[in-house]
């Protein structure tokens, strides 16, 4: 079965996101290249699916994808590779099973991120322009984003410190509860993000930095 994908098409870049796999999003300079980049990351996304006790999607090139929706966000977001568009599917009701699966994948993304953090050096290799956060600053950035994203679905905590495992676990537990609750009729506060979008945005941010940290933990070629 083809992997359903939506595209966010900007002026210079295109972001491709797998609709049923929160966090699996990649960007490039055209639709074809964005789909190719998404395919190339299937193997890196597989540990997330396995951690969630799901069979990873089988992808053999960009032809494995079915583009089901195209959206046009503000170009600045697409240039930065940020999934900002709420799709038509995001507004559809969730069953309890769908909400539970979605939450498991978000939780799995956190587990994969934490494993990468645990094996990464404190000082990461600099990026191509000589910049980039080191490990603890990147963790602090990710946790700060989770604190902000949680508020978009009614989860209000103080922002945990990057090394406060107990506070981070409490924040994540409440985010997961909110995502699961979307499948049992529990209403989110007014003006909240749709749960599918929240899951995609949270998992994307976690994995984008997990993979960056993993790449920058190894010496440059």
Image (cartoon, helix red, strand yellow):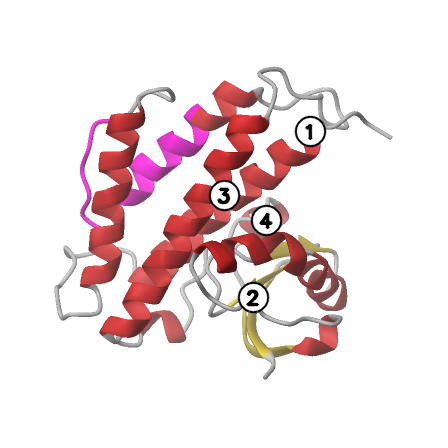
State the separation of the CA atoms marked 1 and 4.
19 Å
Q: Which is nearer the eye, 7 or 58?
A: 58
Indicate which disc, 2 or 3, sits on the residue closer to the N terminus.
2
Residue under the image location 43 percent in, 50 percent down: 108
- State if disc 3 and disc 2 touch (CB < 8 Å): no
Residue at label 1?
A: 216
- Contact between marks 4 and 2 (CB within 8 A): the answer is no
- Residue, disc 3: 112
Label 2 to label 3, Cα distance in Å?
15 Å
| Picture quadrant of residue 18 | bottom right
Q: CA gap, disc 3 to disc 4?
A: 21 Å
* Image spot of residue 85 (x, y percent): 45, 61
Q: Which residue is mark 4?
A: 81
Q: Is residue 60 above or below residue 13?
A: below
Q: Is residue 74 left or right of residue 200?
A: right
Q: Residue at x 40, y 64 (%)?
A: 86
Q: Which residues are drawn in magenta?
A: 140-158
């Amino acid at each position: 079965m083809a992997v359903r994908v939506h595209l966010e098409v900007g002026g210079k870049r295109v972001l491709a996101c797998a609709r049923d796999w929160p966090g699996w999003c990649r960007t490039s300079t055209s639709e074809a290249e964005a789909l190719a980049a998404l395919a190339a990351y299937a193997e890196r996304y597989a540990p997330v699916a396995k951690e969630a006790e799901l069979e990873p999607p089988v992808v053999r090139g960009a032809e494995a994808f079915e583009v089901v929706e195209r959206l046009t966000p503000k170009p600045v977001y697409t240039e930065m590779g940020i999934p900002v568009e709420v799709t038509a599917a995001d507004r559809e009701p969730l069953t309890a099973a769908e909400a539970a699966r979605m939450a498991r994948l978000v939780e799995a993304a956190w587990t994969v991120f934490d494993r990468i953090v645990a094996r990464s050096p404190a000082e990461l290799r600099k990026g191509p322009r000589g910049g980039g956060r080191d490990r603890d600053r990147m963790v602090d950035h990710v946790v700060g984003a989770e604190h902000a994203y949680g508020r978009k679905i009614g989860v209000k905590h103080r922002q945990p410190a990057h090394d406060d495992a107990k506070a981070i676990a409490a924040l994540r537990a409440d985010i997961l509860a909110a995502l699961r609750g979307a499948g049992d009729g529990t209403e989110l506060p007014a003006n909240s993000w749709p749960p599918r979008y929240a899951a995609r945005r949270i998992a994307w941010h976690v994995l984008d930095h997990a993979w960056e940290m993993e790449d920058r933990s190894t010496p440059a070629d």
